[in-house]
Amino acid sequence: MNSWKRAYLHTTRKKGKTILIFSILLIVSTLLLTCLAIRTATSVTALNIRKSLMGSFTINAKQLDMQLEDSVVTEILNIDGLTTHYNLRSYFRADYRSLDGQALEITTDGALDVPKGYEHAGKIISNTHSDADPYFTEAGFKLKKGRHITAEDRNVALIHEEFAQRNMLSLDDHLIFGATGETNRQAEVEIIGIFTNTVPQDAYGMIPSYDLYENIAFSDHATYSQLSYGDGIEHYQYGDFYVDDPAELDNVISNVKSITGLNGDECIYSKNDADYQNAKTALEALQRLVTTIVCVLIAVSVVLLILILSLWTRDRVHEAGVLLAMGINKGDILMQHILEILMVAALAFALSFGTSSLLAQRVGNHFLQQATAKEQVKLMNLTDEAANDKEVDKLFSLTSIKMNVSGSNLLLVYVIGTGIILLSVSLAAYPVMRMKPKEILTRMS
């Protein structure tokens, strides 16, 4: 009778033992498969989050004589790893005047002071895309009427609703931005949008009048260049550029610094990847947690199986002696013991696919919520006005991951499970297998 047949007969006759081993292996394989599914899901989610968060960096070129120009911007965008999405920004101050040259009224309540020469001035921010400006994406500005500024616009403006009401201005009206200082440069602009701030100004009462939210206006680069340089060439103080993969942000910045037009390290570079770093920290914490659980699970499984099988092996000394007396060698006896467990394990591992599918989603979300607790607290502490759709989406994406138990994970469970069984049975049977046949037969008598 070969090892396979003996293993089959022993398994079918010892029903209590078989059911116990089956239950243990089913629990172990379910937990193991669940952990592997969670780890796979977090790896996929990490990649998706990296792509969706679009890490960016900002170039501050104010200290360059000509700042950023179109030729340099084009060269930057040709670098591998950058997306076609970008925004260029500049900041300057200008007087607000009507078309007949009359000074327009600004808000002064809440200002630290009204500097001399700036009694009718405000801060102007030029943008390639005003909807991508930090005031709109981070500070709580919201467009109420009209549309945002785009790259094609020339001599247009967005103004605050308070400024519009104070000076009886509306969409499609025109006003003049006059350069402050000794120059007489000015630009006529059309109002294409009116915005408001949904979050109070933090530095209220501590800043000059032209920096109050109510006195801020947005315009295009042609207007900025006309007032600041008057040379007909567009100039940009800041450039916001976005990368495909935030993990490659440092490499991309290094390549940008090598561009001749940026004069090496004369520009200031700022990384904007806080969202990615928060998500990365949370997901890495989850992966470490899952890896630890897998290692502990394997160790506990080995110890548990060794203890159970060691007790059973001692009770099978008589059986081993009989088989040896029949001329069956120790290798075949050990193989029989291994096959007995493997037969049960094959069914337990297969059924674990179904049980793990039911368990993985709940367990994965629970672990992820524990790993992202700090990030959730940060977002939940935001005011209702600041908790915009983007932040809510980030919160959701960090607290729920779609779990799928794959065939590759099941195959890995078979491999790991088989290794656990081989190790456990071998260690459990070692005390008996190392005994000489005469010693075994002596114990039998």
Image (tube, helix red, strand yellow):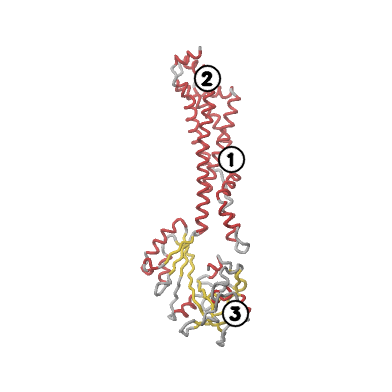
Query: What residue sits 47% from the left and 85% below the top?
Result: 184
Looking at the image, tell me whether mark 1 or mark 2 is earlier in sequence order.
2
Q: Nearer the viewer, mark 3 or mark 2?
A: 2
Looking at the image, tell me whether mark 3 or mark 2 is earlier in sequence order.
3
Please tell me whether mark 1 sits on a helix, a strand or a loop: helix
- The amino acid type found where label 3 is placed reads Asp
Residue 193 visible in image = no
The circle on residue 172 is: 3
Query: What residue sits 59% from the left and 51% below the top?
Result: 400
- The amino acid type found where label 2 is placed reads Arg
Residue under label 1, please give it: 356
Q: Are marks 3 and 2 in contact (CB under 8 Å)?
A: no
Q: Are marks 1 and 2 in contact (CB under 8 Å)?
A: no
Q: Nearer the viewer, residue 206 or 163?
A: 206
The circle on residue 316 is: 2
Label 1: how many Cα within 10 Å (few below 14, some 14–19, many 20+): many
